[in-house]
Image (spheres, helix red, strand yellow):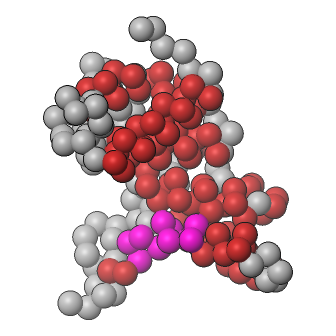
Amino acid sequence: PDPGADAGEGVRGGVARRAARTPAGVGGRRVFPSLSLSAARADAVSFLSSCAHPGGGYGGGPGQAPHLAPTYAAVAALVTLGGGEALSSIDRESLRAFLFASVNPPPSSGFRVCDGGESDVRGAYTALAAASLAGLDAGALARAARLPVFLSACATPSGGLGGAPGNEAHGGYAYCGAAAAALAERAGARFDP
């Protein structure tokens, strides 16, 4: 198939995860600090800004629907880049609206990774990490998502965490769940036992 062909609503071949790959390139700044990155920084900020969705969050490429994974990746890259241009490109109000819209409504708990998407532990981590990095109230977000209820439902008899309630435990999901709980606690979220 043609890699540039339309692969579905808001997705075009090889660009579906470009925003998620940007932090890896930005990380080179820390490995090679002597590189002059002013043009690369401007290009990265421009590209990530083109991935921002008008309703909040970031898609995996320009014009794509917002999703929690590329939202986290874009915010992490912009914070890593630093500087006025990068940090001011994050529309915190629309980001906040997108993150809260990703919360599953009661009586459910946790986060949907995108509109109509799955609810899993990755969503909890990426939502809370993006909020924390952007200086938003991750504690309020965790309370709205009833994070302890969701993480408890994902716990398995083996002591691990599955990606969603009833799933087999997996190390990646355990990391995401523990990191989400740590971010919520760090943000001052208090939960009744």
User: Dividing the picture into quarters, in which one does residue 109 lie?
Assistant: top left
What is the total number of numbered labels drawn onto the structure image? 0
Residue segment shown in magenta:
15-24
- Is 62 placed above or below 185 here? below
Q: Position of residue 173 (x, y in %)?
A: 34, 45
Is residue 89 among the parts visible in the rendering?
Answer: no
Q: Is residue 182 left or right of residue 84?
A: left
On whether residue 21 falls in the magenta region, the answer is: yes
Q: Position of residue 87 (x, y in %)?
A: 74, 55
**20 or 16, nearer to the observer:** 20
Q: Residue at x 61, y 56 (%)?
A: 76
Q: Residue at x 62, y 40 (%)?
A: 132
Magenta stretch secondary structure, dominant: helix
Q: Position of residue 44 (x, y in %)?
A: 65, 74
User: Dividing the picture into quarters, in which one does residue 157 lie?
Assistant: top left
**The C terminus: image quadrant:** top left
